[in-house]
Amino acid sequence: MRIDRVELRLLRLPLVRFFETSFGRIYERPFVMVTVNGEGVEGVGECVADANPFYSSETTRTAWHIIAEFIAPLVLGREFPHPRDVFGALRGIRGHNMAKAAVEMATWDLFAKQQGLPLCRVLGGSNALIERGIASGVSIGIQDSLEQLAERIEIELAAGYRRIKIKIKPGWDLSAVAMVRSRFGQVPLMVDANAAYTLADAPHLAGLDPFALMMIEQPLDYDDVQDHAELQGRLRTPVCLDESLHTVKIAAEAIRVGACRIINIKPGRVGGHGQSIALHDLAADHQIPVWHGGMLESGIGRAHNIHLSTLPNFTLPGDVAASRRYFSPDLIDPEIEVRPDGTIAVPSGAGIGVRLVPDRIAAATEERIELRASH
Ligand code: OSB
Ligand code: MG
C-alpha cells in the first residue's frame, strides 16, 4: 500500500441536540476529515478531537497542524505492507493520538477497499458479531432537569437501545441515578463522570453502590491510574477507564494495579485501529470486558467504530448509536440506524462500507488542504 495523497478538511456540523458533559455543553461538532489515496483507491478517517482541549489535550486545530506538518510527511510516498505498520512509523511524534488515529484509520479503509473486503474482516471481527450486528447503547448528556432526563431515556429505550449511560458531575449524580432507578427499574445503567471527582469524593461515590450500576466511567483525573485503583478498592461498582487509557502500556499498568474492571476503547484515544486491537487483546487476556466508546462522530467515524466493535471481546453494548441522534442529515447515505432489538448492522461493502454524500461534505467544509508525495 503506497500513500500518494492526503487531503484534510475542516468540517462543522450542527448537533441535533446539545450535548453536555462535566466539562461543558456543545451545540455543534467541528472535526477534521482525512482522505488518503493510494494506487487509485481512497480511504477516509475522522479525527475525533473537538474544538476545545477539555476531554484530552488535542483540538481540531492541533490535529490539523500535526497531521499537515508531521504525520503526512511520514506517510506520503511511503510503502506500507499493512495498515498496522502505520502507527509505528509515527512513533517519533509524541502523543497526538487523535491526529495519528485519523490518518491510520483512513489507511485501514484504503487497505480493506484494495482487498475488496469489509473493514471488520481485515480488523479480525468475529463471524457471530458481524452477522448479528453490534449491541448499541446511548450516552445521554447532562440535562436541565430530571424530568427532561426521564423524557430522553424514555425515547431511547423505545428506540431499542440496550443500555443507558448518563453523564454525571457533582450535583448531578445520586439524584439522577435514583430517578432513573425509580422510573425505569433495573434497566442496564451506567454513569460517566469525565474526570469530575477526586479521591476525596470516594464516600460520596460509594453512595452509587446500592443502585447496581454496570460501571462508573472515568470518575477521577483524566490521566490518573493510581487513585482509580484506590477508589476501586472502596467501591462495589466496577470502575471503567476511558480518558486515562491513552496507551496500551498504561492500560496494562491499570490492569496490574486494579484500577479498572472494564475498559472503554476509542480508537482516537489510543492512536487508531492497530492500537485498539492491541488494547482489546490485552483486556481479553485478563478477562476484562471492553466496549466501544463514542466521540459524537459523523457517519465516517461511526462506520469505523461499528467495524471495530465486531472484535470478540466487545461484549458490552457500546456508545455507538444511530446517526440521527447526532446529525440530520449525516454525511453518509443511508444513515446508520439502530434496529428494534438494539443492534446496528455492520455495513457489508468494502472498507467502511458507507456512501459519503459529496454535496453534504462540500457544504460542511470550512477549510481544505491537499498534500502529495514529492516522488
Ligand atoms: O467520555 O465517552 C465520553 C462524547 C464526547 C467526549 C467524551 C465522551 C463522549 C460521550 C458521547 O460519552 C458518546 C457518543 O454518543 O458518541
Ligand atoms: Mg467517557
Image (cartoon, rainbow, N blue to C red):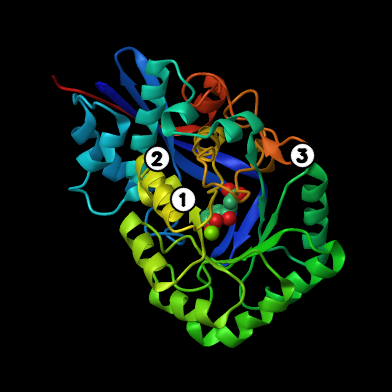
Q: Which image quarter: residue 70?
A: top left
Amino acid type indicated by mark 1: Asp
Of the 4 image quadrants, the one containing the C terminus is top left
Q: Position of residue 143 (x, y in %)?
A: 72, 63
Amino acid type at circle 2 is His
Residue type marked 3: Asp
What SS does tag 2 mark?
helix
Disc 3: residue Cβ within 8 A of ligand 1's nearest atom: no
Residue at far right of view:
183
User: Height in image: 364 above or below 1?
Assistant: below
Write down the residue under mark 2: 273
In the shown orientation, is residue 267 left or right of residue 26?
left
Q: Which residue is at 62% across, 84% downward?
A: 204
**Residue 341, numbered circle:** 3
Q: Is the CB of the residue bearing disc 2 within 8 angstroms of ligand 1?
A: no
* Element carrying mark 1: loop
Residue 2 at what x, y percent from top left? 24, 21
For label 1, the residue is 50
Mark 3 or mark 1: name the one nearer the start of the chain.
1
Q: Nearer the viewer, residue 167 or 259?
A: 259
Q: Position of residue 241 (x, y in %)?
A: 48, 63
Tell me if residue 78 comes above or below residue 207 in the rendering: above
What crowding class fits label 2: few (fewer than 14 Cα within 10 Å), some (14-19), or many (20 or more)? many
Does residue 66 appear to the left or right of 152 in the view shown? left
Check the picture and name the quadrant holding the N terminus: top left
Q: Nearer the viewer, mark 3 or mark 1?
A: 3
